[in-house]
Image (cartoon, grey):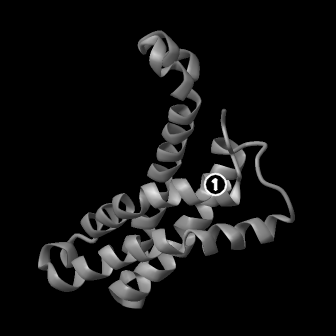
Amino acid sequence: MEAMLVRCTPRALHAKLPLLAQFLRFGTVGVAGFMVDTATVYGTRGVLGLYGAGTIAYLTAATTTWLLNRIWTFRGHGSGPVHQQWLAFLAVNLLGFVLNRGTYFVLVTISARCAEQPVLAVAAGAIAGMFMNFHMSRSVVFRAHLK
Protein backbone atom coordinates (compact mmCIF):
# COMPACT_ATOMS: atom_id res chain seq x y z
CA MET A 1 0.00 0.00 0.00
CA GLU A 2 2.82 2.39 0.88
CA ALA A 3 4.58 1.83 -2.46
CA MET A 4 1.43 2.83 -4.34
CA LEU A 5 1.08 5.98 -2.22
CA VAL A 6 4.74 6.96 -2.80
CA ARG A 7 4.18 7.08 -6.56
CA CYS A 8 1.08 9.28 -6.19
CA THR A 9 2.22 11.93 -3.69
CA PRO A 10 4.58 14.92 -3.68
CA ARG A 11 7.92 14.54 -1.88
CA ALA A 12 6.79 16.71 1.04
CA LEU A 13 4.22 14.09 2.00
CA HIS A 14 6.54 11.08 1.84
CA ALA A 15 7.42 11.35 5.54
CA LYS A 16 3.74 11.01 6.44
CA LEU A 17 3.09 7.99 4.20
CA PRO A 18 3.65 5.33 6.86
CA LEU A 19 1.09 7.04 9.10
CA LEU A 20 -1.35 7.46 6.20
CA ALA A 21 -0.93 3.82 5.18
CA GLN A 22 -1.52 2.76 8.78
CA PHE A 23 -4.66 4.91 8.96
CA LEU A 24 -5.93 3.39 5.69
CA ARG A 25 -5.39 -0.11 7.09
CA PHE A 26 -7.19 0.97 10.26
CA GLY A 27 -10.06 2.28 8.12
CA THR A 28 -10.21 -0.97 6.14
CA VAL A 29 -10.40 -2.91 9.40
CA GLY A 30 -13.09 -0.46 10.48
CA VAL A 31 -15.17 -1.39 7.43
CA ALA A 32 -14.94 -5.05 8.45
CA GLY A 33 -15.97 -4.06 11.97
CA PHE A 34 -18.86 -2.05 10.55
CA MET A 35 -20.08 -5.11 8.65
CA VAL A 36 -19.84 -7.30 11.78
CA ASP A 37 -21.54 -4.58 13.83
CA THR A 38 -24.40 -4.18 11.35
CA ALA A 39 -24.91 -7.93 10.86
CA THR A 40 -25.03 -8.44 14.62
CA VAL A 41 -27.58 -5.63 15.11
CA TYR A 42 -29.82 -7.02 12.38
CA GLY A 43 -29.36 -10.59 13.59
CA THR A 44 -30.16 -9.90 17.24
CA ARG A 45 -32.57 -6.94 17.27
CA GLY A 46 -35.63 -9.20 17.14
CA VAL A 47 -34.56 -10.96 20.34
CA LEU A 48 -32.65 -8.23 22.21
CA GLY A 49 -34.27 -5.03 20.90
CA LEU A 50 -32.27 -2.23 19.36
CA TYR A 51 -30.43 -1.26 22.55
CA GLY A 52 -29.39 -4.79 23.52
CA ALA A 53 -28.48 -5.58 19.93
CA GLY A 54 -26.39 -2.41 19.73
CA THR A 55 -24.48 -3.30 22.89
CA ILE A 56 -23.73 -6.90 21.84
CA ALA A 57 -22.87 -5.74 18.32
CA TYR A 58 -20.34 -3.22 19.63
CA LEU A 59 -18.53 -5.86 21.70
CA THR A 60 -18.50 -8.27 18.76
CA ALA A 61 -17.24 -5.63 16.33
CA ALA A 62 -14.66 -4.27 18.82
CA THR A 63 -13.25 -7.76 19.29
CA THR A 64 -13.10 -8.26 15.53
CA THR A 65 -11.35 -4.94 14.92
CA TRP A 66 -8.91 -5.49 17.79
CA LEU A 67 -7.88 -8.84 16.30
CA LEU A 68 -7.53 -7.53 12.74
CA ASN A 69 -5.65 -4.44 13.91
CA ARG A 70 -3.35 -6.66 15.97
CA ILE A 71 -2.46 -8.91 13.05
CA TRP A 72 -2.45 -6.33 10.24
CA THR A 73 -2.64 -2.60 11.05
CA PHE A 74 -0.26 -2.60 14.03
CA ARG A 75 1.57 -5.87 13.31
CA GLY A 76 4.63 -6.18 15.52
CA HIS A 77 3.55 -3.50 17.99
CA GLY A 78 2.29 -3.98 21.50
CA SER A 79 3.26 -6.64 23.95
CA GLY A 80 2.03 -8.67 26.87
CA PRO A 81 -0.62 -11.35 27.13
CA VAL A 82 -3.27 -11.26 24.41
CA HIS A 83 -6.20 -11.03 26.82
CA GLN A 84 -4.61 -8.01 28.52
CA GLN A 85 -4.12 -6.29 25.17
CA TRP A 86 -7.79 -6.97 24.29
CA LEU A 87 -8.92 -5.52 27.62
CA ALA A 88 -6.60 -2.52 27.14
CA PHE A 89 -8.06 -2.00 23.66
CA LEU A 90 -11.59 -1.93 25.09
CA ALA A 91 -10.56 0.30 28.00
CA VAL A 92 -8.60 2.96 26.11
CA ASN A 93 -11.21 3.11 23.37
CA LEU A 94 -13.88 3.93 25.94
CA LEU A 95 -14.24 7.50 24.65
CA GLY A 96 -14.60 6.15 21.12
CA PHE A 97 -17.21 3.73 22.49
CA VAL A 98 -19.14 6.60 24.07
CA LEU A 99 -19.03 8.55 20.81
CA ASN A 100 -19.91 5.48 18.73
CA ARG A 101 -22.72 3.97 20.80
CA GLY A 102 -23.92 7.35 22.06
CA THR A 103 -24.52 8.42 18.48
CA TYR A 104 -26.19 5.07 17.72
CA PHE A 105 -28.49 5.20 20.77
CA VAL A 106 -29.49 8.82 20.16
CA LEU A 107 -30.28 8.17 16.50
CA VAL A 108 -32.36 5.02 17.05
CA THR A 109 -34.24 6.89 19.78
CA ILE A 110 -35.03 10.14 17.97
CA SER A 111 -35.13 9.05 14.33
CA ALA A 112 -37.83 6.70 13.08
CA ARG A 113 -35.75 6.14 9.95
CA CYS A 114 -32.72 5.02 11.99
CA ALA A 115 -34.93 2.78 14.13
CA GLU A 116 -36.25 1.15 10.93
CA GLN A 117 -32.83 1.06 9.25
CA PRO A 118 -30.28 0.81 12.10
CA VAL A 119 -27.42 0.56 9.59
CA LEU A 120 -27.64 4.37 9.38
CA ALA A 121 -27.12 4.72 13.14
CA VAL A 122 -24.33 2.12 13.11
CA ALA A 123 -22.51 4.04 10.34
CA ALA A 124 -22.90 7.40 12.07
CA GLY A 125 -21.58 5.92 15.31
CA ALA A 126 -18.60 4.33 13.59
CA ILE A 127 -17.60 7.63 12.01
CA ALA A 128 -18.08 9.49 15.30
CA GLY A 129 -15.62 7.20 17.13
CA MET A 130 -13.11 6.42 14.37
CA PHE A 131 -10.49 9.14 14.86
CA MET A 132 -10.44 8.81 18.65
CA ASN A 133 -10.10 5.03 18.35
CA PHE A 134 -7.21 5.31 15.87
CA HIS A 135 -5.32 7.71 18.10
CA MET A 136 -5.84 5.64 21.25
CA SER A 137 -5.10 2.32 19.54
CA ARG A 138 -1.92 3.66 17.95
CA SER A 139 -0.55 5.54 20.93
CA VAL A 140 -1.60 3.35 23.87
CA VAL A 141 -2.61 -0.21 22.92
CA PHE A 142 -0.17 -0.95 20.12
CA ARG A 143 2.32 1.91 20.70
CA ALA A 144 3.07 2.25 16.99
CA HIS A 145 5.13 5.43 16.95
CA LEU A 146 6.47 6.11 13.51
CA LYS A 147 9.33 8.52 12.81
Quarter of the figure that contains the C terminus: top right
Q: Which residue is depicted at the point 44% across and 55% down?
A: 131
Q: Which residue is depicted at the point 59% across and 30% down?
A: 18
Q: Position of residue 129 (x, y in %)?
A: 41, 63
Q: Which residue is depicted at the point 25% across and 64% down?
A: 120
Judged from this view, the residue extending furthest toward the right is 80
Quarter of the figure that contains the N terminus: top right
Up the image or down, 92 lies above or below 21; here it is: below
Q: Position of residue 38 (x, y in %)?
A: 39, 65
> Dot 1, crowdedness within 10 Å: few (<14), some or many (≥20)?
some
Q: Position of residue 113 (x, y in %)?
A: 14, 73
Up the image or down, 112 lies above or below 67; here it is: below
Asked if one can make out residue 90 in the rendered structure from this viewpoint, the answer is yes
| Residue at image mark 1 | 139
Q: Which residue is depicted at the point 14% across and 78% down?
A: 111
Q: Position of residue 74 (x, y in %)?
A: 68, 45
Up the image or down, 38 lies above or below 1; here it is: below
9 and 127: which is toward the camera: 9
Q: How many marks?
A: 1
100 and 122: which is toward the camera: 100
The residue type indicated by label 1 comes to Ser
Q: Is residue 31 left or right of residue 110?
A: right
